[in-house]
Image (tube, grey):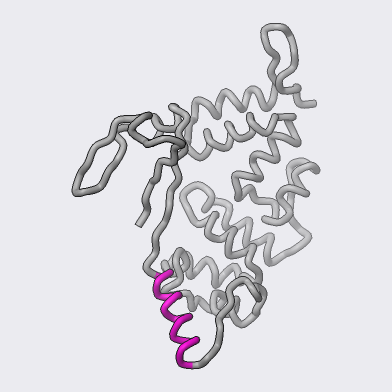
Amino acid sequence: MLAGVVITKDPVDTYVPLYVRDGQISTQYIMTTLEELGLLKMDFLGLRTLTVIQDTINLVKQNRGIDVVFDKEMADPKVYKLWQEGKSCGIFQFESQGMTNFMKELKPDCLEDLIAGVSLYRPGPMDQIPRYIKGKLNPGHNEYTHPRLEPILNVTYGCMVYQEQVMQIVRDLAGYSLGRADLVRRAMGKKKLDVMAKEREIFIHGQVDENGEIIVPRMC
């Protein structure tokens, strides 16, 4: 279950109108309007599998006297072997046939591969999957269109996977401020093509204000 929650300093109805349906209180404004008003909306994901995991921990403690501790060991090769063999049924975001085949081909052996795999297996980034697999299986042969991209993209084998990587690229290559880089990230996430087209021109040619002061330097 995915729930969008608006977080405000004062009661929500002091900012936006509300309505009640089936006993649930919601805002009458859509997500984009809430953001334009400056309100913070967070998505919280609830999973039944989390309850199953907690019940399992309790049963292991009760019947075997063993305390299961998460985050203690994140490099157990036996665990990654399960993904490599496609034994990921019941694991959130890894149990579809497409994702299972992806993991069997990728042969993940670290947490970074699992994180990148989830990020790549969606419309758009899926085009980068063959390149990511090639980079994983052939280390040292990754290609970068600019030398300054290597320290940003080497962890993902030359592929732009994360929004934070995009932000760092526009900052390092075009001199964007952190705030403006975040605007680019949001435009990409919301698929605002008009904003992206405008930022592309600024990325290449730079930007100056009405007084001639440089906001974004021109790329050399």
- The magenta segment is 49-63
Examine the structure image and report whether residue 61 is included in the region drawn in magenta. yes
Main SS, magenta residues: helix
Q: Position of residue 196 (x, y in %)?
A: 55, 29
Q: Residue furthest front?
A: 10
Please tell me which residue is depicted at 37% across the width and 50% down the height of the picture: 3
Instruction: Using the rendered view, name the quadrant where residue 146 is placed.
Output: top right
Please tell me which residue is depicted at 73% across the width and 47% down the height of the picture: 152
- Foreground of the two, 33 or 198: 33
Please tell me which residue is depicted at 45% across the width and 45% down the height of the picture: 42
Q: Position of residue 76 (x, y in %)?
A: 65, 79
12 sits to left or right of 61: left
Task: Please give the count of numbered marks on the rendered protein.
Answer: 0
Examine the structure image and report whether residue 181 is included in the region drawn in magenta. no
Q: Position of residue 220 (x, y in %)?
A: 80, 26
Please tell me which residue is depicted at 65% across the width and 74% down the height of the picture: 72
Image quadrant occupied by the N terminus: bottom left
179 sits to left or right of 213: left
Instruction: Using the rendered view, name the quadrant where residue 139 is placed.
Output: bottom right
- Foreground of the two, 112 or 30: 30
Q: Position of residue 144 (x, y in %)?
A: 74, 47
63 sits to left or right of 172: left
- Foreground of the two, 197 or 2: 2
Instruction: Using the rendered view, name the quadrant where residue 218 is placed.
Output: top right
